[in-house]
Image (tube, rainbow, N blue to C red):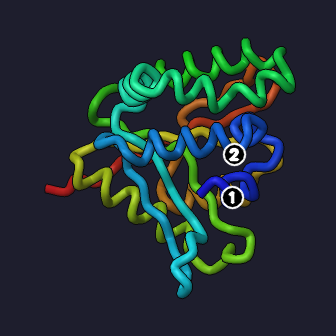
């Protein structure tokens, strides 16, 4: 998952934090009962795509930051030593993540990525479909995600195809325009 994340999100903040941090992050996310995690594997049982998220994202992040604080701190140490100025951004990102969500009936989709060699084969759609189905099984009413607003039309078209609609747009402290999408989940009952 870490390798695919790094390929899919070059130049992004979590990628800058490095593979050590990403291993800690994805391990913490995937092992929690609130999480929704799916992987796609090829014929050789090699992961070629993944999607991760969690029910009640704000509470989820508060819990894993509290539970795994020392591990997260160690995971960010190399990036912090390389660029100490990122400390404020790291804190701001953690506080924003812990403030996400609107309760136990919402799900945050945190990351989805498909290996460049496997893109275009429908894997991303299968992963999102499985994610939305699991959200319905868990009786959630909506799924939210955030993605870049600029130079990202392919991604925007992909999410709109799956029923996501822009809920709000905002600009980060670093000047990136972002779009928050929401998708209403069909009841499983």
Circle 1 SS class: helix
**Could you tell whether 35 is left or right of 155 in the image?**
left
Where residue 131 sits: x, y (%)?
40, 57
**Could you tell whether 174 is left or right of 96 in the image?**
right
Q: Quadrant of the C terminus?
A: bottom left
Residue that mark 2 sits on: 19
Circle 2 SS class: helix
**Could you tell whether 111 is left or right of 17 in the image?**
left
Q: Quadrant of the N terminus?
A: bottom right
Residue at 72% across, 60% down: 154
**Could you tell whether 53 is left or right of 174 in the image?**
left
The Cα atoms of the two marked residues, 2 and 1, are separated by 8 Å
Position of residue 167 relative to residue 171, above or below, is below
Where residue 132 sits: x, y (%)?
38, 56
Residue that sits furthest to the left in the current view = 189
Residue that sits furthest to the top in the current view = 88
Position of residue 183 relative to residue 160, above or below, is above
Residue 175 is drawn in which quadrant?
A: top right
Q: Residues within 10 Å of mark 2 (few under 14, many from 20)?
A: some
Residue that mark 1 sits on: 3
Where residue 71 sits: x, y (%)?
53, 29
Tags 2 and 1 touching, CB below 8 Å? yes
Residue at 47% across, 55% down: 163
Q: Residues within 10 Å of mark 1 (few under 14, many from 20)?
A: some
Q: Nearer the viewer, residue 85 or 150?
A: 85
Residue 55 is drawn in which quadrant?
A: top left
| Disc on res. 133 | none
Position of residue 15 relative to residue 163, above or below, is above
Residue at 31% across, 56% down: 134
Residue 149 in sight in this render:
no
Q: Earlier in the sequence, mark 2 or mark 1?
A: 1
Q: Nearer the viewer, residue 153 or 65?
A: 65
């Amino acid at each position: 998952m870490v390798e695919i994340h790094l390929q899919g999100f070059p130049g992004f903040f979590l990628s800058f934090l490095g593979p050590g941090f990403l291993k800690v992050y994805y391990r913490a996310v995937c092992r929690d009962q609130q999480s929704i995690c799916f992987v796609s594997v090829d014929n050789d049982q090699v992961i070629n795509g993944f999607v991760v998220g969690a029910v009640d994202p704000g509470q989820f992040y508060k819990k894993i930051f509290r539970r795994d604080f020392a591990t997260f701190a160690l995971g960010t140490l190399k990036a912090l030593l390389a660029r100490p100025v990122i400390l404020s951004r790291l804190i701001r990102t953690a506080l924003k993540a812990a403030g996400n969500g609107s309760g136990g009936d919402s799900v945050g989709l945190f990351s989805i990525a498909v290996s460049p060699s496997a893109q275009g084969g429908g894997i991303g759609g299968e992963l999102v479909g499985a994610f939305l189905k699991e959200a319905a099984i868990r009786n959630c009413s909506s799924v939210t995600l955030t993605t870049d607003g600029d130079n990202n039309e392919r991604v925007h078209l992909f999410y709109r195809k799956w029923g996501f609609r822009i809920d709000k747009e905002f600009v980060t402290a670093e000047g990136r325009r972002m779009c928050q999408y929401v998708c209403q989940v069909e009841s499983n009952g």
